[in-house]
Image (cartoon, grey):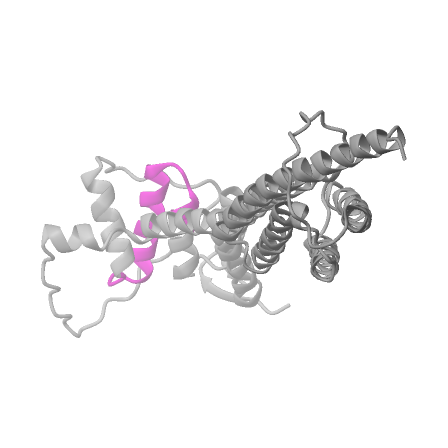
Amino acid sequence: MTTTVNESGVRANPAEARELVERGIAAARGGQRRVAAGLLARALKLDPRDERAWLWLSGVVDDPAQRAFCLQAVLRINPQNPHARRGLAYLERQGTVNARPIADLSVPAAAPETTTETPATPATSPAKDTAHRDWWLHWRWQHRETSRVRLVLWILPIVLLSVAVFLHQSVSIAREQALAALAAEQASAFTVESPSVVAVATPTPIPALEAEPLAVVESLTVSYLSAVEAIRADLRTATMTYRQETSQPGGASVNHVAATQRLRSTVAQALANLGELRVPGVLLPAHEDYRRGLELELAGLDAILEFYSTYDVAHANRAALRFQEARAFIERAQVGFQAQLQLLGEESLISAYTIR
């Protein structure tokens, strides 16, 4: 290890001193003030004329008198050091006049005077001096602000993630509620398809001139009602299947779309089968009501499919309105079918006791 003699009684080791200074500066920048002070003090024991070590040591000691001691040491090495000058001026304004030496550290020898005159530095105005704060205060402020920015950079992604999760859950809940409301409305529209017997007052028979014999008309009526009952049975089965598939909590939209498309195909097929039937004259109003109800059901199902593709509330509202209208037509058609069945039953009972 090479050592040089800088002053009488002071042995300097520049290489080891520089390494300690670098470690002390790194510790100071990391906020470890006591560690930095110890490393810089050890460096100054090896090389008391290290200007940078004295300057950084003044920034990590807490005692203003010791800070003044360090700055005075800097000026003994380099009388023109601007940081040391500003630091001492600041301490004088704060009332710190006397300097207190740091244990085991000696004041370095003064720098040799030069014959060249240095130009007098112009006096800085108070505003400029305030703007350019002392370097260690600026360092502390910058370190504190850096810590705040680092904290914000850590917190901001967490906040954004929380907001995104909250919005996703809100949209999912709103979508599930809208789908549940649509499924309930659609199921209620087909509720009238249940084969419930409704007591209807027997209408007074009105004599009418039929183009065909009465027996042919009755046979045609029975055949039509049987075919309509088969169509209604298929619709009831499809509706129950649709209700089971869409009532599962947390079901995917893809499954709801597939179930809606299957129900729409069943309704369209029922409408096509209804159009192929030969309608008796007495059942023509009920037939038209039932056909109109199925057409409105198709329109409502189309609106549901549009809602699944865009999630526009307007489509959901239009679907609910079409289902309500369809329910009214289907209920009225069912009343006509039940009345005609009851009338056929009474005519059959009367004809059984007629004298032939």
**Residue 272, position as x, y percentages in the image:** 71, 62
| Residue displayed at 23% across by 53% down | 86
Exactly how many numbered labels are in the figure? 0
Answer whether residue 28 is visible to the viewer in this image. Answer: no
Judge by depth and name the residue closer to the eye, 290 or 84.
290
Answer whether residue 219 is visible to the viewer in this image. Answer: yes
Judge by depth and name the residue closer to the eye, 36 or 213.
213
The image quadrant where one finds the N terminus is bottom right
**Residue 12, position as x, y percentages in the image:** 51, 62
Q: Is residue 153 left or right of residue 233?
A: left
**Residue 35, position as x, y percentages in the image:** 55, 46
With respect to residue 335, does 136 lie above or below?
below
Judge by depth and name the residue closer to the eye, 31 or 288.
288
The image quadrant where one finds the C terminus is top right
Q: Is residue 271 left or right of residue 103?
A: right
Q: State the image quarter where residue 255 is shown.
A: bottom right
Q: Residue furthest front?
A: 356
Q: State the image quarter where residue 277 is shown.
A: bottom right
Q: Give the extent of the magenta segment.
A: 57-81
| Residue displayed at 73% across by 62% down | 276
**Residue 317, position as x, y percentages in the image:** 50, 46
The answer to if 80 sits in the magenta stretch is yes
| Residue displayed at 51% across by 59% down | 21
The answer to if 25 sits in the magenta stretch is no
Judge by depth and name the residue closer to the eye, 118 or 123.
123
The kind of secondary structure the magenta stretch mainly shows is: helix
Q: Is residue 232 left or right of residue 86?
A: right
| Residue displayed at 49% across by 56% down | 25
